[in-house]
Amino acid sequence: MQDKIKVLIDTDIGDDIDDAIAIAYALNCPELDVLGVTTVYLDAPARARMTKSLLRAAGRDDIPVHPGSSATMMEPAPQDFDLIQYYPDMDGMPVGPDGSGVQFLYDTLRANPGQVVILALGAFTNIALLIKEHPDAIDLMKEIVWMGGAFDRHFLTWNVCCDIEAAAMVLASGAPVRIVSRDVCEPCQMPLEQIDALRSSNHPVHRELIRLIDAWWDRHAFYKKGDRPILFDSLAVTAVFTDEFLTYRNERVLVETKGEFTRGMTFAVKAGYDRFPGQRGYPAIEEIPVFQVTDTVRAQEYVKHHFERLIGWKDR
Ligand SMILES: [Ca+2]
């Protein structure tokens, strides 16, 4: 078997349910070696303890978890934030010191130069700080696989809007980013029968996922009981190790930071755009970096593959 691909997972676990599902899925992918997890956005320490609880249920207490930035590039961390999937028994979970995430990312990249894929599953704050504080991190990483952006229709996506300045900075930084867009994620939804099957399992990782799903159904502002999880972050995990389910196209991508109605949108800029009347002052087309962006997805096959990995959980 080929060497495992080393990954660092940067997550905003705790709001939508897909991060928790994606982490459980990643841990059961034999192609991947998860070197550590960092958390980002609002209460990053609580997200870290939640992650540790999930890792413990998975028998993977050995994986270090470090809280990253709770603040965004423009806003301080809030004083009171209620993480909807948090349970009181997560309080004592052993994680790294508050704010240690960015340094942990850098130290891990330095220890494994050119080998580590960063899986960016939340706002880009930690990655932006990593690049700002340690510009050599760009050369040390193998790749960033990022879940975010939308290109087939106008859509403000969560991972951009949580920290628009961080997203703009990372995408303009020259870092090697591959983009798993919202466009391919929406068709990939977890059927309720799959959740029923997880509920009837006694494996601790399934029990943990079910109590997170129940909290998500009960307490999320947008979702309600019976809504199906969209497998946003899992698709990014999958993109790290196989092209079986996704195809890509090359796009020159910008993040809108100033628009009255469009702030936070991702734009794929086409050749010639910089020469439109009224567009003077925009960067020349060749100055806008090119990214691989997801184009198509084999959704039905993907949802089946994903569940086989998730339900067939192996202790190791
Ligand atoms: Ca996420």
Image (cartoon, rainbow, N blue to C red):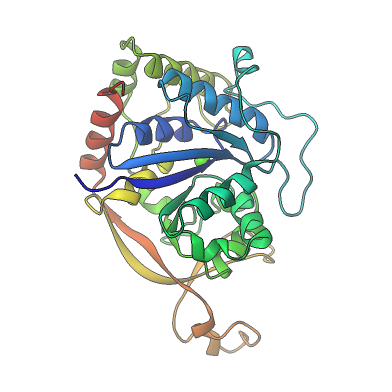
- Residue at the extreme front of the image, as rendered: 111
Q: Quadrant of residue 4?
A: top left
Determine if residue 79 is in view: yes
Which quadrant is the C terminus positioned in?
top left
Left or right placement of residue 272 versus residue 101 in this view: left
Whole-percent x, y for residue 231 in the image: 38, 38
Image label count: 0
Question: Height in image: 119 above or below 189?
Answer: below
Left or right placement of residue 23 versus residue 89 in this view: left
Which quadrant is the N terminus positioned in?
top left
For the point 33% across and 9% down, which residue is it? 202
Whole-percent x, y for residue 118 in the image: 47, 51
Determine if residue 186 is in view: no
Whole-percent x, y for residue 38 in the image: 57, 40
Whole-percent x, y for residue 136 in the image: 58, 65
Question: Height in image: 229 above or below 241?
Answer: above
For the point 69% across and 33% down, which residue is it? 97
Which of the pair 130/121 is nearer the observer? 130
Which of the pair 172/141 is nearer the observer? 141
For the point 52% across and 48% down, which residue is it? 108
Which of the pair 228/170 is nearer the observer? 170
For the point 57% across and 69% down, which residue is it? 172
